[in-house]
Image (cartoon, rainbow, N blue to C red):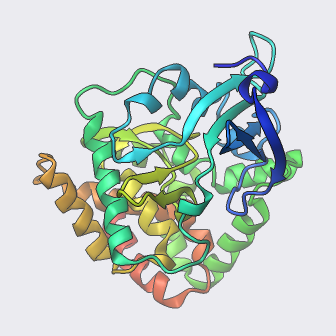
C-alpha cells in the first residue's frame, strides 16, 4: 500500500504510456520496468471516470480488495496480477487511486482472435473455482450492490450521462441500440421494459437463490492464460455477492461471438465444473440460469440490435424467464 505514484513505482527504470484498447473506463495506463520486470500502472479517478460513476464506485473497490486481502486469498487458478496499490488523494478521499500490476500482455487472449475449446474450458473452470472458493466464507470487503449490474448500462444511466455530459461512456450506443431493437423486435423489448425501468425485482429474485462471490466482468479483454493453466483475470472494480450463474451469464452474453461452443454447451460445461467441486445444483440451477441470462439481456440487449440469429436465441429465453421473477 503506497501513498504516492513515486512510492508505488520506486526503482522504475523505464516508463512508457500505453493504451489498453479493450478498456472501457477513462483510466490511464503506463508500462514501467522495475527490477528488470515489466509492470502496468493503472490510475483512475472515480470522480470523473464514467464506469466508476455509473457503477456507484465511491470507495475504489479494486483498491479495497487489496486492502482487505482478497487478491491474496484468491484460488491458485486465478492470477489478478495486482502487486500493489496506492491512494493518491487526501486521507479522507479514495480518489484518485492506482494499481500496480505485472505486465501480462503476452498472456492475454488476443483481441478479436478465436478462442479455442481448451482455453474456454480453462476459463470456465477458473470461474467455478472462484465461485466455490469463497462459498463458505465470503470476504469482508466493499462490494457493488448486485442490482448495480442492471443499472450501470441502463437507459436511465445513459440519460444521466447525456444530461451531465459524462465523457467516455457508451451512452450514445445504448440509446441508439435500444431504439433500433425496439423498432426491430418490439415484442421482445416490451418484455424487458419493466426491468429496464426497475431491475430490483429481478435482482431480488436472483439473490433469493444460492449466491457466492462474483468478479463481475469475465469479458475476453480481461482474460488470459498462463502456460501452467492459471487464468489471468483483470479489472476487479465490480466485485459482488450474487448468483453462481451471474458471471457465467455475462460471459455468455458479452463474448457471444467468440465462444468455441454453443451457449447451451457453455452453460452445461460450467454446471459440470460446479458439480465436480461439490456444488449440488439440482432444484435451483435452471431457474437461476434463466433469470441470470434474462438479466444479461437487460444489460446488453441494446448491443444485439440487427443480429438476427443472436436475437432468435435470446427471444424465447426472455419470454420463458420473465414469468420466473
Q: Disc count in the image?
A: 0
Q: Position of residue 262 (x, y in %)?
A: 33, 80
Q: Position of residue 51 (x, y in %)?
A: 70, 46
Looking at the image, residue 173 lies above or below residue 130? below
Residue 251 figure quarter: bottom left
* Nearer the observer, 232 or 13: 13
* Nearer the observer, 108 or 273: 108
* Nearer the observer, 221 or 255: 221
Q: Relative to 1, is 292 on the left or the right?
A: left
Q: Residue furthest right?
A: 165
Residue at 48 percent across and 52 percent down: it is: 232
| Quadrant of the image containing the N terminus | top right
Residue 192 seen anywhere in this rendered image of the structure: no
Residue 39 figure quarter: top right
Residue at 58 percent across and 62 percent down: it is: 106
Q: Relative to 113, is 172 on the left or the right?
A: right
Q: Residue furthest front?
A: 36
Q: Position of residue 294 (x, y in %)?
A: 41, 62
Q: Relative to 318, is 48 on the left or the right?
A: right
Q: Residue furthest bottom?
A: 308
Looking at the image, residue 268 lies above or below residue 43? below
Q: Relative to 107, is 322 on the left or the right?
A: left
Residue 102 seen anywhere in this rendered image of the structure: yes
Looking at the image, residue 263 lies above or below residue 161? below
Residue at 40 percent across and 46 percent down: it is: 78
Amino acid at each position: 500500500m503506497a501513498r504516492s505514484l513515486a512510492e508505488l513505482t520506486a526503482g522504475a527504470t523505464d516508463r512508457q504510456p500505453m493504451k489498453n484498447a479493450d478498456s472501457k473506463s477513462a483510466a490511464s495506463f503506463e508500462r514501467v520496468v522495475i527490477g528488470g520486470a515489466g509492470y502496468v500502472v493503472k490510475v483512475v479517478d472515480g470522480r470523473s471516470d464514467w464506469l466508476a460513476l455509473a457503477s456507484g464506485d465511491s470507495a475504489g473497490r479494486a483498491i479495497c480488495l487489496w486492502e482487505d486481502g482478497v487478491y491474496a486469498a484468491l484460488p491458485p487458478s486465478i492470477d489478478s496480477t495486482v502487486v500493489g496499490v496506492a491512494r493518491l488523494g487526501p486521507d479522507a478521499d479514495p480518489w484518485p487511486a492506482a494499481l500496480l500490476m505485472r505486465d501480462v500482455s503476452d498472456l492475454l487472449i488476443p483481441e478479436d482472435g478465436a478462442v479455442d475449446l481448451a482455453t474456454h474450458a480453462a476459463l470456465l473452470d477458473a470461474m467455478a473455482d472462484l465461485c466455490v472458493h469463497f462459498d463458505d466464507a465470503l470476504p469482508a470487503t466493499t462490494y457493488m450492490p448486485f442490482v448495480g449490474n442492471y443499472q450501470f448500462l441502463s437507459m436511465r444511466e445513459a440519460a444521466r450521462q447525456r444530461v451531465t455530459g459524462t465523457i467516455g461512456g457508451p451512452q450514445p450506443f445504448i440509446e441508439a441500440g435500444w431504439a433500433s431493437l425496439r423498432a426491430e423486435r418490439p415484442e421482445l423489448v416490451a418484455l424487458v421494459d419493466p426491468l429496464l425501468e426497475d431491475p430490483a425485482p429481478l435482482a431480488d429474485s436472483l439473490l433469493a437463490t444460492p449466491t457466492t462471490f462474483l468478479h463481475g466482468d469475465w469479458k475476453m479483454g480481461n482474460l488470459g492464460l498462463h502456460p501452467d493453466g492459471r487464468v489471468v483475470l483483470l479489472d476487479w472494480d465490480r466485485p459482488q455477492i450474487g448468483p453462481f450463474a451471474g458471471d457465467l451469464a455475462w460471459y455468455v452474453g458479452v463474448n457471444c461471438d467468440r465462444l468455441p461452443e454453443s451457449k447451451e454447451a457453455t452453460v452445461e460445461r460450467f454446471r459440470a465444473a460446479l458439480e465436480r467441486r461439490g456444488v449440488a445444483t439440482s432444484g435451483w440451477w435452471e431457474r437461476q440460469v434463466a433469470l441470470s441470462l434474462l438479466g444479461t439481456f437487460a444489460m446488453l440487449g441494446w448491443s444485439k440490435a440487427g443480429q438476427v440469429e443472436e436475437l432468435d436465441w435470446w427471444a424465447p429465453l426472455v419470454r420463458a424467464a420473465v414469468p420466473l421473477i
